[in-house]
């Protein structure tokens, strides 16, 4: 294997390690707890350990050295999984089929993304707003469909912003659109994406992702929250809005830890219920006194105008955030997605 390949791999691995350790050292405690979502901190240290081992092997030119024939595994294979240590020729038939499937997914990431189209979801009003901190950003929301016919809702946030974050998010978008139609639920998709990105040499940061499936017949919202800000569920009863319910993470952010089994949660929605999905750019918007907008203030804005249609609620949040920050620039990409169950259904 050429020396330049080892240098390229080492550069990406060092960047991945730097991004991870910087986040560990600087992230506020509350954010750390949300992104970890119950995962032990030792899981992050294990991930750093795996990266360190790969860097050492890159330095020694033993990265990708086959344990069977002592040659080097194929470079494309190693880019997908920098821990690979067996040539494809030595794979079992089942392992070969799995790798071919993952290679097809990796190729699809490189294709041009199609424009986003919001579907007409029966019984649900949808409103959305996205504003990058720079020309392009790392926030992403989308509308999908799962294999069982349920409507999919996705909101994700790449750590960081700008062009690099945007490129990573394009990969997440493509994989979601590829995997969801062949899956029966959000958790299976999240687990697959984490598996594909965990050792991918081109993926040098982590992503928070809230992925949900909505069944119009039962009004059930099934979701997997990979370290993302907890969406707000506001229930209406007798014309009054109850205290907010937070849809907390059910697993850590994608690519943040080495191994984790994500779990599924489910809530049953009723007419008038409102679900608000958002990214850090909304709740961590600062005013001139360095006060954060906060998730409680966001919930209060929705509660005060809960009778409005979903699109108007999104507009209200946007105006309130802009009024709050004044002349201060957004420090992070900002996205809000409001779902409102139609009343009278």
Image (cartoon, rainbow, N blue to C red):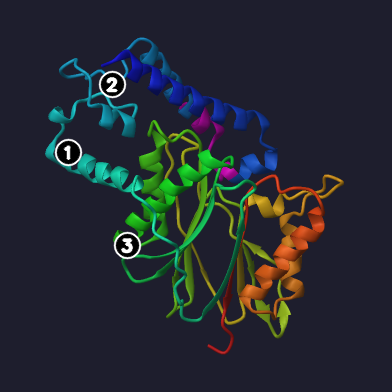
**Residue 44 inside the magenta-drawn segment:** yes
- Which range of residues does the magenta coloring cover? 35-46
Q: Quadrant of residue 162?
A: top right
Q: Is residue 91 placed above or below 167 in the rendered structure?
A: above
Residue extending farthest to the right is 289
Instruction: Give the CA distance from mark 1 to mark 3.
Output: 23 Å
Q: CA distance from mark 1 to mark 2?
A: 17 Å
- Mark 3 — residue? 181
Compare marks 1 and 2 and give the one earlier in the sequence: 2
Which of the two residues, 109 or 299, is positioned nearer the viewer here?
109
Residue corresponding to mark 1: 96
Magenta stretch: dominant secondary structure: helix
Q: Is residue 285 left or right of residue 145?
A: right
Extreme residue in the top direction: 60
Residue 265, horizontal then vertical, whole percent? 49, 60
Q: Residue at x 40, y 39 (%)?
A: 197
């Amino acid at each position: 294997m050429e020396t330049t390949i080892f240098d390229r791999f080492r550069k990406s691995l060092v960047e991945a390690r730097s991004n991870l350790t910087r986040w560990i050292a600087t992230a506020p405690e509350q954010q750390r707890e949300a992104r970890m979502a119950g995962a032990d901190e030792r899981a992050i240290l294990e991930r750093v350990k795996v990266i360190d081992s790969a860097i050492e092997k890159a330095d020694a030119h033993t990265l990708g050295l086959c344990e069977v024939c002592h040659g080097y595994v194929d470079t494309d294979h190693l880019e997908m999984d920098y821990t690979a240590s067996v040539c494809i020729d030595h794979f079992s038939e089942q392992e070969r089929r799995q790798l071919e499937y993952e290679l097809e997914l990796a190729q699809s990431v490189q294709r041009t993304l199609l424009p986003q189209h919001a579907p007409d979801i029966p019984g649900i009003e949808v409103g959305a707003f996205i504003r990058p901190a720079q020309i392009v950003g790392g926030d992403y929301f989308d509308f999908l469909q799962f294999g069982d016919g349920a409507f999919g809702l996705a909101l994700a946030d790449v750590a960081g912003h700008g062009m690099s974050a945007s490129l990573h998010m394009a990969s997440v978008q493509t994989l979601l659109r590829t995997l969801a139609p062949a899956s029966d639920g959000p958790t299976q998709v999240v687990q697959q994406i984490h598996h594909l990105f965990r050792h991918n040499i081109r993926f040098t940061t982590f992503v928070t992702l809230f992925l949900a499936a909505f069944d119009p017949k039962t009004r059930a919202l099934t979701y997997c929250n990979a370290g993302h800000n907890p969406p707000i569920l506001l229930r209406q009863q007798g014309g009054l809005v109850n205290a907010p319910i937070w849809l907390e993470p059910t697993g850590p952010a994608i690519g943040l830890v080495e191994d984790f089994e994500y779990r599924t949660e489910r809530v049953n929605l009723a007419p008038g219920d409102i679900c608000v999905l958002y990214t850090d750019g909304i709740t961590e918007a600062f005013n001139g006194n360095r006060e954060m907008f906060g998730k409680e203030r966001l919930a209060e804005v929705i509660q005060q105008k809960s009778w409005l249609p979903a699109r108007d609620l999104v507009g209200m949040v946007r105006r309130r955030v802009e009024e709050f920050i004044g002349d201060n620039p957004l420090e992070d990409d900002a996205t809000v997605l409001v779902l409102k169950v139609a009343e009278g259904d």
